[in-house]
Image: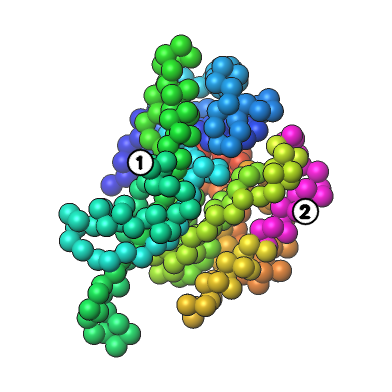
């Protein structure tokens, strides 16, 4: 039975833009009652942090007013350089001890001091037998580590929930890539595929094999390119071409790395991006020799009008994962 979702806002914050969707209903068919985006003045958000809280909240409130938002509870979807995603392997211990083991050994996989991060993990599978089916002497678990800079999280939460700006409540914070991947998992026909979520600043990549995360990567884009992409809703063709070429190269390098330890080929690529690359899906498919889909949540939502699902799908995924 699908969970009923109270009215809430799925919010994404980019370096140059905010976008949001107001949704309610059941998580298998959400009603979209408001949606919109607003470009931010340069320097409002920097390095994933809200550098100018008063400016940010002015534009945030203006967006909510312009597009008739009324909800006060927010699910924040994060995809920026302050979020780090890694696939790691840890010794398998009893359930009550597993968290301590993961937390203690996480520093081996993350290049930022753990005491500066909020860290969560998800056990994806266990390795308890060898290739011949014999029990391993030292079983391990594979886990997806999701780390976010603590000062960044505090900065965003404190800004949005500051009473002087309004009575907004952040109900949850989710990584964009995992929210999107969870919905793709419910729909895909492929056993092995890649999920790629790209903003103007960073791309996060997961390879899924048999319903389990087999690889995780994060790539930061060149700051000069990110700055140019952030200045317009319709990027210059040369900048858009650069983004498409980056996505191609990162797909190839990720698949080549994956093939070192895995025999099954990646059969499909699902993409969500901040900029519209839907016109390039056929080119990507031909060049990469896989099925490519610019993923949207169109069939899972109801809206009184032409809802641009390709632009707001990541926002919608946050509600579907409650």
Residue depicted at 25% across the width and 66% down the height: 92
Residue depicted at 81% across the width and 48% down the height: 237
- Tell me which segment is drawn in magenta: 231-248
As rendered, which of 298 and 153 lies closer to the eye? 153
Residue depicted at 31% across the width and 52% down the height: 103
Whether the residues at callouts 1 and 2 have beta carbons within 8 Å, the answer is: no
Q: In the current view of this chain or complex, which residue is farthest to the top?
A: 164
State the image coordinates of residue 256 (x, y, percent, origin top left): 59, 73
Q: How many neighbours does mark 1 have within 10 angstroms: few (below 14), some (14-19), or many (20 or more)?
A: few
On screen, residue 15 versus residue 206, left or right, reads right
Q: Determine which quarter of the picture holds residue 228.
A: top right
Q: Secondary structure at mark 2?
A: helix
State the image coordinates of residue 185 (x, y, percent, origin top left): 43, 58
Numbered disc in front, either 1 or 2 = 2
State the image coordinates of residue 285 (x, y, percent, origin top left): 67, 66
Quarter occupied by the C terminus: top left
Q: How many neighbours does mark 2 have within 10 angstroms: few (below 14), some (14-19), or many (20 or more)?
A: some
Residue depicted at 17% across the width and 61% down the height: 94
State the image coordinates of residue 223 (x, y, percent, origin top left): 69, 44
Is 236 one of the magenta-colored residues? Answer: yes
Q: Which mark is residue 322?
A: 1
The residue pinned by badge 2 equals: 241
Secondary structure mostly taken by the magenta-highlighted segment of the chain: helix
Residue 112 visible in the picture:
yes
As rendered, which of 49 and 77 lies closer to the eye? 49
On screen, residue 41 versus residue 151, left or right, reads right
Q: Determine which quarter of the picture holds residue 14.
A: top right
Going from N to C along the chain, the mark reached first, 1 or 2, is 2
Is 261 one of the magenta-colored residues? Answer: no
Q: Determine which quarter of the picture holds residue 270.
A: bottom right
């Amino acid at each position: 039975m699908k969970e009923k979702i109270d009215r809430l806002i799925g919010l994404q914050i980019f370096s140059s833009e905010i976008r949001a969707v107001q949704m309610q209903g059941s998580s298998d068919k959400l009603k979209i009652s408001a949606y919109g985006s607003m470009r931010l003045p340069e320097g409002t958000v920097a390095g994933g942090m809200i550098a100018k809280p008063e400016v940010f909240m002015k534009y945030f409130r203006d967006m909510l007013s312009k597009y008739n938002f009324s909800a006060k509870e927010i699910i924040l979807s994060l995809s920026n350089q302050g979020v780090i995603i890694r696939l790691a392997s840890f010794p398998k211990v009893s359930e009550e001890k597993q968290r301590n083991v993961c937390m203690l050994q996480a520093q081996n996989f993350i290049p930022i001091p753990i005491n500066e991060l909020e860290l969560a993990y998800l056990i994806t599978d266990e390795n308890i037998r060898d290739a011949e089916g014999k029990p391993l002497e030292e079983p391990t678990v594979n886990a997806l580590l999701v780390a976010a800079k603590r000062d960044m999280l505090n900065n965003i939460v404190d800004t949005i929930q500051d009473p002087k700006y309004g009575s907004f409540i952040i109900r949850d914070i989710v990584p964009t890539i995992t929210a999107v991947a969870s919905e793709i998992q419910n729909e895909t026909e492929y056993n092995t595929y890649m999920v790629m979520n790209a903003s103007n600043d960073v791309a996060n990549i997961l390879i899924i094999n048999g319903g389990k995360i087999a690889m995780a990567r994060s790539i930061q884009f060149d700051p000069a390119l990110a700055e140019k992409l952030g200045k317009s809703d319709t990027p210059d063709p040369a900048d858009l071409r650069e983004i498409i070429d980056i996505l191609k190269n990162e797909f190839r390098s990720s698949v080549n790395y994956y093939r070192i330890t895995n025999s099954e080929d990646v059969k499909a690529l699902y993409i969500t991006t901040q900029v519209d690359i839907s016109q390039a899906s056929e080119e990507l498919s031909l060049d990469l020799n896989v099925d490519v889909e610019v993923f949207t949540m169109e069939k899972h939502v109801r809206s009184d009008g032409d809802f641009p699902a390709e632009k707001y799908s990541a926002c919608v995924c946050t509600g579907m994962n409650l």
